[in-house]
Amino acid sequence: MKKIIRVAALSGAVALALAACGSAPEESDETAGAGAGGSDFKACMVSDSGGFEDKSFNQSGAEGLQRAEDELGIEAVTVESAAETDFTPNVEALVSQDCNLVIGVGFLLADALTAAAEANPDVEFALIDSGFNAEGLENAKPLLFNTQEAAYLAGYVAAGTSTTGTVATFGGIQLPSVSIFMDGFVDGVAKYNEDNGADVKVLGWDKEAQTGSFTGDFENQTNGQNIAKGFIDQGADVIMPVAGPVGLGAAAAAQQAGDVAIVGVDADWFETSPDYSSIVLTSVMKEIGQAVFDTVQEASEGNFTSEPYVGTLENEGIGIAPFHDYDEKVPAEVKTAVEELAAQITSGELVVESPSQN
């Protein structure tokens, strides 16, 4: 699993000083004066309502921006959204601060960023996990990830380590960037069953019908805890929550139950959620930080394009994390099979599809 583990080498959690929720963005103590590094380029980022300390995709995006500030000498500004009503005013506030590049984190910011991109053709925009809602915008770049490929591998591992024969997945809000994980996970379990004559069941998602279990939010960890308890009561001993901070509620339920493992998403939860590291089987990784860094670098050098970035196993934009404390619990034959499947996906021999893929 050399390729997969190399992809998984993200940095640990970073404590960021953030702007006040819903208010005009201000430079944090860490970003103030960053432009002195030799660049007058200002890159700005607005979170979705999960916030930059979600230990997931918002945090990964902020880490990529922080790295760009440190290594490229650009000026970085972040603003955190407390609710969806903050999206448009936060984006407009960043534009008014003469940001050269405005990055939105998450599908829910598509409307706000599309409107801003249409109204401000001289400002460049990037959107993580979503396309824009208009065609032909030369100043708008989607940063996308075919996470069904890595989730397929995680589903195979989950099925191969389950002792109850039941695993589960659920989402926060039913969005393409959420269900794409669930599609890959279900297909990975199905592949394990096919290879081994097994009958591991998946609770929480029907890929064919595109229906399943969602908490309806990305903030309330109690909702995640309750839905995970329901799965555990039905025998699930591996759960993949695709719900940002809500997923930590599922981790709490798994930890309390004992003998239940969690598959993290977006970042390596073993690193970003140390309170639950002992129950993290693996994580489905998106190299959001690297995608943000590359986009900022291109834009600051005058090489910004609207061509979408798509992270795949082949370009190492996605992957699965090491098994950490579960390494000895994952059967050798499962590890070998996952290595082979990853190679087949990378070469194009095996195509993992999702209705939500890019």
Image (cartoon, rainbow, N blue to C red):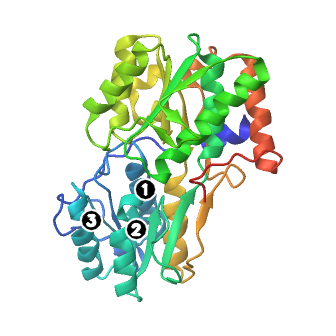
Q: Kindly identify the amino acid type of the residue bearing the numbered disc 2.
A: Ile
> Where residue 219 sits in the image (x, y, percent)?
27, 42
The residue most toward the bottom is: 122
Q: Nearer the viewer, residue 81 or 166?
A: 166
Q: Kindly identify the amino acid type of the residue bearing the numbered disc 1.
A: Gly
The quadrant in which residue 193 appears is top right
Q: Residue at x 66, y 17 (%)?
A: 199
- Ranked by sequence position, the earlier of labels 3 and 2 is 3
Q: Nearer the viewer, mark 1 or mark 3?
A: 3
- Mark 2 in CB contact with mark 1 (< 8 angstroms): yes
Quarter in which the N terminus is drawn: top right
Circle 2: element type: strand
> Where residue 322 sits in the image (x, y, percent)?
60, 31
Instruction: Tell me the distance, in whole angstroms, between the alpha carbons under discs 2 and 1.
Output: 9 Å
Can residue 193 be seen here? The reply is yes
Report the residue marked by disc 1: 61
Does residue 47 appear left or right of residue 322 in this picture? Answer: left
> Where residue 29 sits in the image (x, y, percent)?
24, 60
Report the residue marked by disc 3: 87
Circle 1: element type: helix
Q: Kindly identify the amino acid type of the residue bearing the numbered disc 3.
A: Phe
Which mark, by number, is residue 103?
Answer: 2
Quick one: label 2, few (<14), some, or many (20+) residues within 10 Å? many
